[in-house]
Structures are given as C-alpha cells and as structure tokens.
Image (cartoon, grey):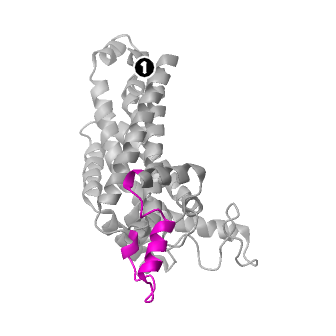
Amino acid sequence: MGAYVIRTSLFKLATLFIISIVSFLIIHLAPGEPSQIDPLNPRFTQEDLARYRAAFDLDKPLPVQYWLFYKKFFTGELTSLKDNQPVFGKIWRRFLISLPLFIVGTIITWCLSFPLGIAGALRRYSVFDRSTTFLSYLMISMPSFFLAYILIIAVVQGFTLPFTGYHVPGLEVSVLGIETFGRGDVSPLFRINDRVWHLVLPSLVGAIGGIAVLSRYVRGQMIEVVDSDFIRTAHSKGLDENTVNYVHALRNAGLPFVTMFGLILPGLIGGSVIIENIFAWPGMGRLGFEAVLARDYPVILSLNFISAILVVIGTFISDILLVIVDPRIRL
C-alpha cells in the first residue's frame, strides 16, 4: 500500500508540473498581451508602458516569466494586473461566496441521483422508470441558461421576490472578516433566510443537469450488476430482496462513483460561469470570466493551476479509496 501511494504521488506531481507548463504556454500564445488592454490612461506614454511591463515581468523571456510567476504564486506575492491587488485575496473572497453554492448543489445532486437511479433500475420499464428516463433526457437537452430564465420568470411572476445576487443589498454580513458592514436592525434569522433564499435558484439550476446525468449512470451501473451471476446466486441462496439489492448489488455498482466523487473537487474553484452571471452571483466562475475579459494573466493562471491541483488531489483520493474498496487494483 505504501509503495502504491508513493508511486501514485510522484505520478500526480509530474502531471501537475506538465499542466503548469502547458497552461502557461497556452495563455501566452493567445493574441495580445495585458499592456494592450487599455488605453490605461489617455496620457499613457511608451515610458509608462515600459515601466508597467517591467513591474509585472512582461518584458522578460517566457522561461523567466514562468519561473517568476510560480515563485510568486507559491510565496503569495502574486498581484493582479487589473487592480494590483493580491491574487490570493481576490480568489479567497470569491471562494467563500462560491462555497455555499457548490455545497448545496452537490448535496442536491448526489442525494437525488442515487434514489432515482436505483429505483429506476429495480423497477425497470415501469411507469416510474420511463417517466424518470424522459425527464432525465429532457433536462440533459435543456441548456442551463434557458432553465434559469424559466425559473426566474416563474419566481418573479409568482412570488415577486428578489433572486439575483447572494443577499438583499444592505444586508451584508461578515464572513471571516470579509464584509464588516451592513444594517444592524436586521435579525440574524432574517439574514440566514435571505441567504438561503438566494441559494435556492442557482443551486437548483446547477444541480438539475447533474441529477439527470448521474441518475442515468447510476441506473446503468445498477442494471449491469443486478444482471450479474453472483446476484442470481445470492437470490438462489434465499437471501431477501433488500439484502441482495442494497448490500451486494449496490456495493459493487458503487465502485465507479468512488472515482466520480474525487472529481467533484474542481467544482470548488470552477463554479458555473453562465449561472453565476445570470444570477449575479459574484463567485469563482464570474471572477474567471472577468479576468479573461481583462486579460488578467495572474488571476487566470492562478485559477487554472488551483483547478489542476484540485483535480490531482481529487483523483489521488479516488485512487486511494478504490484501493481500499478493491485491493485488486494494487496489482
């Protein structure tokens, strides 16, 4: 087990190093550079432009820029080209805003996908199975932005309640010291209700597509296992239906989802650009979108590299869990 962990760790580190090089080159192969985004100022002279490029190491060769970027990245000295603010501070603030959206959406997706998929597999070709199949394909085919606008229209016409942003303006609360202002005459319970309400629509829109895909995957895996020889053997031994389905079948059908579980970590940093823009949710996806428009290379590369780190960590956790669940993988 120890040798497997060490070997896997070295492979993941090598993969991360290659990703860092490729992502850095792709960003710098794109047309233009940050110094061309402006007119930063109508009186911006060539000397000012040269100082600007030197301040952010844009005048150095690419290998030197690569070294300096990741040196500043790991020492926390990286600053944004757009506003000269620390990159990690900007990412941390948006991360805390995206985190509740990610957690709620993930919980909804996983808690609904498994019951729907398992029930569809055990009641194959029933009215329930055909109905969930139809709804799943409908949700897979429907773009998230279209569904978001339908829900927004329904909420506005039916309840006349606010739906954009992550709180009602003026009800800001302190989150780990990020926001220290807001009205003091509003009760904490009202603030909590306000945050929960604003979480409902974007979380639901983000989860519906995942529920549709994951439930079909659960159904397919469960059907494959239920039709296996060892399940028929379990039935022939006289085991009750629940033991066969929810102990023997579900345990074996769940092996692929150990791998999928590790891949949800990148959602912490990626978010959903479309959903966050529609609902004016100032999270990670919107930060990345704004950084691309501003050609803010430090923010773009930092988000990309952190996403890569989360992918590597997620797949590493999945590898270890798979070895624990199925020791044959070590061979």
Q: What range is drawn magenta here?
A: 34-63
Residue found 36% across the figure and 51% down from its top: 23
Q: Position of residue 231 (x, y in %)?
A: 33, 18
Of 252 and 167, nearer the camera is: 167
Magenta span has 162? no
Q: Is residue 298 above or below residue 173?
A: above
Residue found 40% across the figure and 30% down from its top: 254
Image check: 88 left or right of 15? right
Residue type, mark 1 in image = Asp
Q: Is residue 140 visible?
A: yes
Residue found 58% across the figure and 72% down from its top: 167
Q: Is residue 295 above or below residue 11?
A: below
Magenta span has 38? yes
Q: Position of residue 247 (x, y in %)?
A: 45, 23
Label 1: which secondary element: loop
Q: Crowding at label 1, few (<14), some or many (≥20) Cα neighbours within 10 Å?
A: few
Of 266 and 29, nearer the camera is: 29
Q: Is residue 1 visible?
A: no
Instruction: Find the residue positioned furthest to the front.
Output: 47
Quarter holding the C terminus is top left
Residue under numbered circle 1: 326
Instruction: Find residue 242 and report its image quarter.
Output: top left
Instruction: Find residue 208 and report its image quarter.
Output: bottom left
Q: Position of residue 41 (x, y in %)?
A: 45, 86
Q: Is residue 95 above or below residue 181?
A: above
Of 128 and 38, nearer the camera is: 38
Image check: 224 left or right of 35? left
Q: Position of residue 223 (x, y in %)?
A: 28, 30
